[in-house]
Amino acid sequence: MTKELKFNLITRKYKELFLPNITITMANNLAAFVDTIMISLFLGVSRMPTIQLCFPVLAFMNFFQTMFGIGGSLLAANAQADYKKDKGNRIFTISICAVFGIGCLGALAGTLFRFWIIPLICSNPDLINDVSDYFSILVLGFPLMCFLVTISYFLRVDGCAKLASSSILISNAVNLSMDCFLIKGMGLGIKGAALATIIGYICGVTYLVIGYMRHPKRKFRFTLCSEPNTIWKEFKEICSKGESTASVWLYLLVNVQVLNTLILNYGGTLAMQAYSICKNSLSLGNIFFLGTAQTMQPIVGVYTHRGDYERARYILKYSIRLIFTTALILILIFTVFPQFVICMYGNIEAQSTRYFRSVLHIYSLALPGVGFSLLMNYYFQSIDKKKLSKLLTAFEALLPAVLACPLALLLGMNGVWSGLVGGEFISMILIFMILVRDRLVSKGKRSFLQPVDQSHLVYEFTVKMNIPETVKISEKIHGYMESLVGSKTAMIVCLALEEMLTGIVMENIGKNDVIDVRIRDERDEIVILIQDMGVGFNPLSHNSNHSFDNAEVLQKIASDIKYDLSLGMNVTTICLAKHNNSIK
């Protein structure tokens, strides 16, 4: 089996999820990006920092939607992998209801306490009125924002990523058109930008709810649970699973608030404008970084959960290459064509343009560190390294501000910019050191904190979807299995394989696709795990047009059969009892 064939299925699944995830991430981050551009174009660059100054409040709400989105979707995906539909539905229900309720509380608290919150996030008298106008309306959209972003995580692992991306794209398309209409046409200014965002969320949520209710592949459904202890237990599981990754938003809240204050104190409004341009422009890089990380996370999480460490590592390495390639391309663009980036924000006087260009050159160097640290944070979460994820989240998010404070005293604004870039590079180096140390301590038995030796694995292979190939692989496996478990068990294993693979091929006649098979030794039984992305052949169903005979044979020889969709792939687990007289 060639390497290309071995990783064919998982690579195709990654590529299938990548574009919708990039689209979802882009759409999730475009609201602030579009508002910043529109405010700069229509109202002038001097009023652009409004969005950046409101970021700490948005970061606070992002903490909850990320915690319930990531934590809930990972647990629900694992429940699907374990064929526990009821648990998956409960987790889905708890996550969505909880985050919507928190969004409502956030809107209420933001409205009631806005006169205390606004002076905390903006100390500049020239900007405080704009911040007040934008914030007062934006908080009213928190419930819809939390609902839309959180449910999009579930749709990704439910094979409905395109629906999620379409709904958020609609949200942002409406936001963009309403920005033009409300800011410029109606003359509402900053208030129009916030109102446009809320109207966009309303349209996006409406489209998503209607589309998901009708989606043929939909697996998650709202359910009622009458046991408070079960609800509370699973609520805590969701929070625990997602908290370490989501906590980056709380650290970013502190980080950005400190940096906003430093920049206003040491550089004034011009430096704040430069920082807003850099943050807004480099958010394009964050779109790719987040999209890559969020594509990787559920795949690595599910494959790690099944003990397929080799494929989990393969997807991580694939993602790392994408991150660094994207970072280098963006550094090249921001270094060679900074004028192209700056011109997006309208006509800016020559002196300010030179300053913005020099800051953009420096700030873009942080991209490799930002991308790698973000990716590894999601990775550590997916392999259940919670303490490490929490440590690195705090370190990576707070270090730039920690470095910037003393450097600002020594070097002024140059110290602030140096602290931002230096903090990201130090975080990246720390992660490399942790990985290398673990490899050395384990004497090569672990790589990327996962076992290299898969002693539970008896045999694995990837086979093309055609009858001659499946027959050939069954014959090849028989001799190998016979030497391990004896002739009778080997015969049953090969019979089950041949019937299952033939059934899949018959359901997918004419398709150039592959099937992944892993055979595990579980002491008292042999477990066969089969995955493919074709038309589903469910050996428990009588609805198959071609393969009911194969299903009937499988049901007779297997002690247990489970079939379901996981990550949008067909996953079948067949358990075959060992025969005592055949075990060696």
Image (cartoon, rainbow, N blue to C red):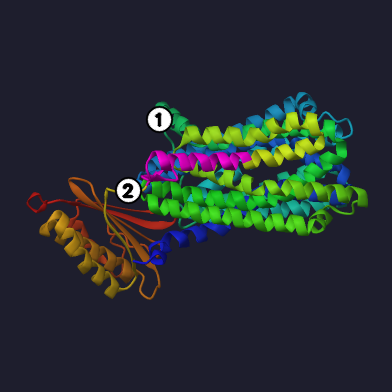
Q: Residues within 10 Å of mark 2 (few under 14, many from 20)?
A: few
Secondary structure type for disc 2: loop
Residue nearest the viewer, comparing 340 with 219:
340
The one nearer the camera, 462 or 298, is 462
Nearer to me, 162 or 515: 515
Residue at the spot 84% in from the left edge and 40% down from the top edge: 271
When the figure is inspected, residue 511 is found, relative to residue 424, above or below; the finding is below
Amino acid type of the residue tagged 1 in the rendering: Thr
Residue at 20% across, 68% down: 475
Inter-mark Cα distance, 1 to 2: 37 Å
Residue 349 seen in the current view: no
| Quadrant location of the N terminus in the rendered image | bottom left
Residue 311 percent location from the top left of the image:
41, 54
In the image, residue 85 above or below residue 500: above
CA neighbours of label 1 inside 10 A, class few (<14), some (14 to 19), many (20+): few
- Image coordinates for residue 333, horizontal then vertical, percent: 73, 58
Q: Is residue 450 left or right of residue 170?
A: left
Q: Quadrant of residue 262?
A: top right
The residue that label 2 is drawn on is 453
Residue 174 visible in this rendered orientation of the protein: yes
Judged from the image, the secondary structure of the residue bearing numbered disc 1 is: helix
Residue range highlighted in magenta: 426-451
Q: How many marks?
A: 2
Q: Nearer the viewer, residue 268 or 192?
A: 268
Q: Main secondary structure of the magenta part?
A: helix
Tag 1 residue: 230
Q: Can residue 379 be found in the magenta stretch?
A: no
Q: Say whether residue 428 is magenta.
A: yes
Q: Earlier in the sequence, mark 1 or mark 2?
A: 1
Q: Position of residue 319 (x, y in %)?
A: 53, 54
Q: Residue at x 60, y 48 (%)?
A: 290
